[in-house]
Amino acid sequence: GQQVMQIPQYQHVQEGEDFTTYCNSSTTLSNIQWYKQRPGGHPVFLIQLVKSGEVKKQKRLTFQFGEAKKNSSLHITATQTTDVGTYFCAGTDGNNRLAFGKGNQVVVIP
Amino acid sequence: DGGITQSPKYLFRKEGQNVTLSCEQNLNHDAMYWYRQDPGQGLRLIYYSQIVNDFQKGDIAEGYSVSREKKESFPLTVTSAQKNPTAFYLCATAGREADEKLFFGSGTQLSVL
């Protein structure tokens, strides 16, 4: 079945620095979604990417969808303490099944 | 999200007991989902329903049961057959299209006494 892998699983980031988290699928995806879960909270939708090579920006966050539609990345610049949490990617395969990665837990060091 | 209510927030289960987790939504969404979250394991799909009176098993349905008698409600029962029920349970909703974004409830933490 479809597998979505995220790397790294954990990151410690100094406040003010940039970081990237990656998402890779074993199959071609029709779209990919990103969610953020704050500590003690529930996942909240950030964005959806649909087109091959698509790039979308939300302030300090840049999301990319690979040309082959099998990988994606989230890049955050000038990290703030509010960026703490776990970032999940979720991909929809050709059978319309959504599969979540295990997440990237981000700790921000002040 | 304010449109999805999960209750209770914390739940304790005794050995051999069935417990039911509630999920109610007022978003008028057709699709509803139950996910289980364990530390470091991400979100795993238990059951989902795309329309009233119909539901399908997800990836880890064993030991769980659901019903969808009303559009607004999708309760999850954790049966005694589920030998490792301790986890954070999340209910989610989405529009009819499969790639609609998910809206999550605030979750229920289930623990075994």
Image: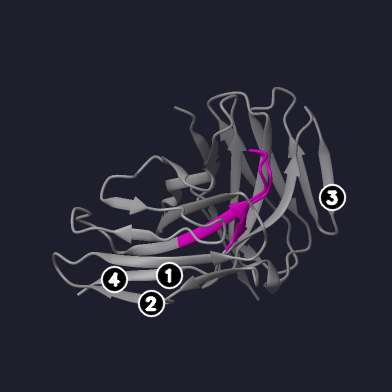
Residue B111: assigned label: 4
- Rendered location of residue A54, percent (x, y): 81, 34
Residue at 73% across / 56% down in the picture?
A: A18
Q: Which amino acid does label 2 sit on?
A: Tyr
Residue A101 appears left or right of A65: left
Q: Quadrant of the N terminus of chain B?
A: bottom right
Q: Which amino acid does label 4 sit on?
A: Ser
Callouts 3 and 2 on one subunit: no
- Rendered location of residue B93, percent (x, y): 59, 54
Give residue A72's quadrant in the image: top right
The residue that disc 2 covers is B10
Q: Nearer the viewer, residue B1 or A66?
A: B1
Chain hosting mark 3? A
Q: Quadrant of the C terminus of chain B?
A: bottom left
Q: What residue type is labelled 1?
A: Thr
The residue that disc 1 covers is B108
Q: Do the residues labelled 2 and 1 touch (CB within 8 Å)?
A: yes
Task: Say what secondary structure mark 1 lies in.
Answer: strand
Cα distance in 3D space between marks 2 and 1:
6 Å
Callouts 1 and 3 on one subunit: no
Q: Give the range drawn in magenta.
A: B90-104
Residue mark closest to the camera, 1 vs 3: 1
Q: Is residue A26 magenta?
A: no
The residue that disc 3 covers is A57
